[in-house]
Image (cartoon, rainbow, N blue to C red):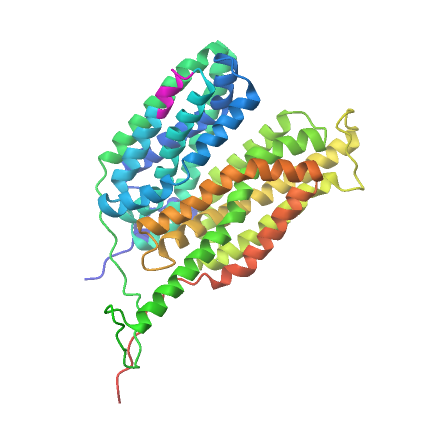
């Protein structure tokens, strides 16, 4: 019997906004929102807590944080193996519990090696969560709704990050730096609450589509029982997934640029006030939170590989807009106040850049996530998801050193290098075709 799709059952307003059917997903939505809230509180707290509350030197704390995050890189593959054995829900629950333990340990850390250890624990939890979260979406949603859900959870994440950051900023303004201890404790509690939401979810493994290529030519088995065609098909799947991992890296670096590069660029290269980066971050958060589902549903190309190509072209344009204020025709003098005319011009270029960046993020994020679980028959499995998340973890660890080195060599270099990487990724995106069903021809 034919059933009416979720898209047809949705109210008109929800359909126009591109929001997937939400009924029955309350705990899943709440868990995602609470987890993002905890991450939002983390962003302004980590370094500040250890420097201003514990009195540790900033440079050494930064190094200890980087070491801890680097040590946690292999956790993506361990989480993938665990996911294959227990399913994504268990890994997501364990990830939130591990993050709660890590933030609890913050309260007792007062030495540099403590800082490294607690960041191993916290980053391990974060890596575990994102290794399994995409596959968990495939366990709780319908196949035709996947990209809409990736867009919707992306919006939730931005809302949670903004709310967490605002709560932390408000507490610091009202209660001073003494509130950092309590904010860390509350952060740990939010992860436990998210774990509880995910632990009570009902999950159903998605059906395995028939994606193997069937040939009319007789198949000769290999000695281990695997046919030559099967071996070639698996090799092709592996190559395409590795290409996806490579194509994802410019997006990872672009995400890192928003938190690492923008603040240094606007203050040191352009001479703008320190609040400039915060303003741009707010603009990005508002656009992504408010427009992700609409753009994904009504503007983005339906084929994910085409959405990726379009997103990278827009991202490259955004990188070019970021370069404009530092062009030789508009020299910046960080040591002196910026002339009003130059400041207005710089702000115009930066706002245009962050708008393009945000639109590119909306095009890229859901499409890349959809490809990460559908590009090959085993894409949602533990090893492939661990590999995909490893590209995220590695990019985030490498980005601070990479961008600062390029910025020191010249204010245009980091944006130019990222623009070139985006153009290369756009050229490679058409090769990211998802498997199609090939049927055997009937003999006449």
Magenta part of the protein: which range? Answer: 102-109
- Quarter of the picture holding the C terminus: bottom left
Q: Residue at x 40, y 14 (%)?
A: 182
The residue positioned farthest toward the bottom in the image shown:
444
Residue 296 in view here: yes
Residue 405: x and y, percent? 64, 37
Task: Residue at the far left: name it.
Answer: 1
Magenta stretch: dominant secondary structure: helix
Q: In the displayed structure, would residue 34 be above or below residue 364?
A: above
Q: Position of residue 224 (x, y in %)?
A: 24, 68
Q: Position of residue 368 (x, y in %)?
A: 44, 51
Residue 158 in sight from this viewpoint:
no
On screen, residue 166 above or below 320: above
As drawn, is 281 to the left or to the right of 191? Answer: right
State which quarter of the image contains the N terminus. Answer: bottom left
- Residue located at (39% from left, 52% from top): 372
**Residue 192 highlighted magenta (yes or no):** no
Residue 200 located left or right of residue 304:
left
Q: Is residue 427 left or right of residue 20?
A: right
Question: In the image, is residue 107 part of the stretch drawn in magenta?
Answer: yes
Q: Nearer the viewer, residue 282 or 333?
A: 333
Residue at image x 56%, y 52%? Answer: 312
């Amino acid at each position: 019997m034919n059933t009416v799709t979720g898209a047809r059952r949705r109210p008109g307003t929800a359909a126009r906004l591109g929001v997937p059917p939400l009924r029955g997903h309350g705990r899943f939505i709440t868990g995602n929102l609470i987890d993002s809230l905890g991450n939002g509180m983390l962003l302004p707290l980590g370094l500040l807590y250890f420097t201003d509350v514990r009195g540790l030197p900033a440079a050494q704390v930064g190094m200890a944080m980087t070491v801890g995050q680097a040590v946690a890189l292999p956790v993506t593959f361990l989480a993938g193996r665990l996911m294959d054995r227990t399913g994504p829900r268990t890994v997501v629950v364990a990830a939130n519990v591990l993050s709660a333990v890590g933030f609890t340990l913050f309260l007792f850390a007062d030495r540099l090696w403590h800082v490294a250890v607690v960041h191993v624990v916290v980053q391990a939890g974060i890596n575990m969560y994102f290794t399994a979260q995409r596959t968990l979406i495939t366990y709780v949603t319908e196949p035709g709704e996947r990209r809409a859900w990736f867009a919707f959870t992306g919006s939730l994440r931005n809302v949670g990050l903004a709310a967490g950051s605002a709560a932390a900023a408000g507490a610091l303004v009202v209660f001073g730096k003494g509130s950092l201890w309590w904010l860390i404790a509350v952060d740990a509690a939010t992860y436990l609450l998210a774990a509880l939401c995910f632990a009570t979810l009902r999950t159903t493994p998605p059906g395995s589509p028939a994606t193997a290529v069937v040939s009319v030519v007789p198949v000769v088995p290999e000695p281990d029982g695997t046919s030559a065609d099967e071996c070639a098909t698996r090799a092709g799947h592996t190559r395409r997934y590795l290409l996806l991992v490579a194509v994802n890296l410019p997006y990872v670096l672009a995400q890192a640029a928003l938190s690492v590069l923008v603040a240094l660029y606007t203050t040191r290269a352009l001479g703008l006030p320190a609040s400039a980066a915060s303003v741009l971050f707010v603009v990005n958060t508002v656009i992504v939170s408010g427009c992700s589902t609409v753009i994904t549903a009504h503007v983005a190309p339906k084929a994910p590989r085409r959405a990726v190509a379009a997103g990278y072209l827009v991202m490259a344009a955004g990188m070019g807009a970021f370069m404009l204020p530092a062009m030789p025709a508009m020299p910046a003098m960080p040591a002196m106040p910026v002339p009003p005319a130059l400041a207005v011009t710089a702000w115009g270029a930066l706002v245009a850049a962050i708008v393009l960046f945000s639109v590119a993020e909306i095009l890229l994020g859901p499409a890349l996530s959809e490809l990460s679980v559908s590009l090959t028959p085993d894409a949602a499995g533990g090893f492939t998801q661990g590999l995909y998340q490893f590209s995220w973890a590695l990019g985030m660890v490498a980005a601070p050193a990479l961008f600062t080195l390029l910025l020191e060599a010249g204010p245009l270099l980091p944006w130019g290098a990222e623009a070139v990487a985006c153009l290369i990724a756009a050229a490679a995106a058409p090769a990211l075709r998802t498997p199609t069903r090939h049927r055997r021809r009937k003999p006449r």
